[in-house]
Amino acid sequence: MNYALVGAFVLLLGAALIAGALWLAAGGALQKKYDIYLAVEKESVAGLNLNAPVKYNGVDVGKVVFIQLDPHNPELVRLLFAIERGTPIKVDTEAVLKTQGLTGIAYVELAGGTRDAAPLRAAGPGQYPEIRTKASLSARLENVLTTVLAKLDSTSNNLNALLSDANRQAFTSALADIAVLSRTLAQRKGTIDTGIASAARSFQNVERLSVQLAPVVAQLETAAAQLAPTLERVGAGADSVEKMGNEVKLAGAAAGQAAVSAGAELQRFSVQTLPELQRLLAEMNDLSISLRRLSEQTERNPAGLLFGRAAVPNGPGETTPAAPAR
């Protein structure tokens, strides 16, 4: 047996095994390729560690490779995921922080991504595709609990204000008044029953009266239908009267204008013609006086119309003046 040959074979086999193990450890032909994605969380990532699993609908597709506060905004946390190449990360895919069982180990769950949505791409060169984030269940519960606690605190304050000493006294007084009213109603039960019975009889009488008045109402409706044409004619007559009134109004306005014009003419007559008429009347008066004197003279001496007036004899001591020489 050649021990040297056996030793060489063992060394070669060991070297081959070590090389295969190293190749498999490095991935070998089964090595997976990963793509880096960015996610920005707006809540605490307590419990999330590096190499924490990233799952897509419960299937492991990658791991967390980077966790850091945003240097520009400490309220944000930047996360980098190494996700297996070929995983259908779409523009509507969302990342949510979840905890695994009772251990509280956090991991990232990817959800969403409709079939027709476009694949998620980087916004620019040198940047990672950014996956949208969604508030975790614990964050949503915390927000709900905070809101509920705030409302409970407000309700408690309102109850304290409602149950103040003044309100309790007022409530006690109201209860006392209600008790007095109850006793009064109990004492007046018979009167109230009688009033209710009277009201019931009144309602019955009203019902009978309405039944009796139904024919009268029908007759009134018939009369109203018959009076409708008459009312229409009355309306037409009213329109005619209104039209006549408008015409009378216009005629009155015209008469007013005529009266104004007549007043102006009368004023002009009184200023211009009246003085001439007064002078004419004065001359006619003088003429009448002259005619009356002539008539009287004619009655006394009718011959005077032919021979003129006779010379008046001289009185005592008067002489007749000599005629002038020719």
Image: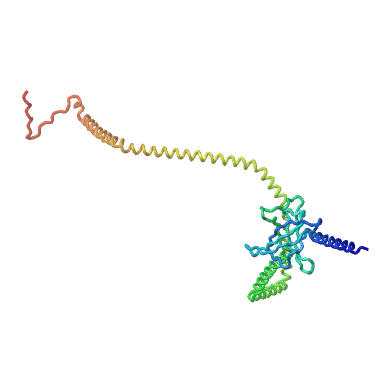
The residue positioned 67% from the left and 42% from the top of the image is 226
The residue positioned 78% from the left and 57% from the top of the image is 32
Residue 221 image offset from top left, x and y in percent: 69, 47
Residue 60 image offset from top left, x and y in percent: 79, 60
Farthest residue toward the top? 326
Query: Image quadrant for the N terminus?
Result: bottom right
Number of numbered discs overlaid on the protein picture: 0
Query: Image quadrant for the C terminus?
Result: top left
Color style of the picture: rainbow
Residue 146 image offset from top left, x and y in percent: 69, 68
Quadrant of the rendered image containing residue 84? bottom right
Which of the pair 250/88 is nearer the observer? 88
Which of the pair 212/287 is nearer the observer? 212
Farthest residue toward the right? 1
Which of the pair 278/271 is nearer the observer? 271
Residue 143 image offset from top left, x and y in percent: 70, 65
Locate residue 108 relative to residue 256 in the image: left or right.
right
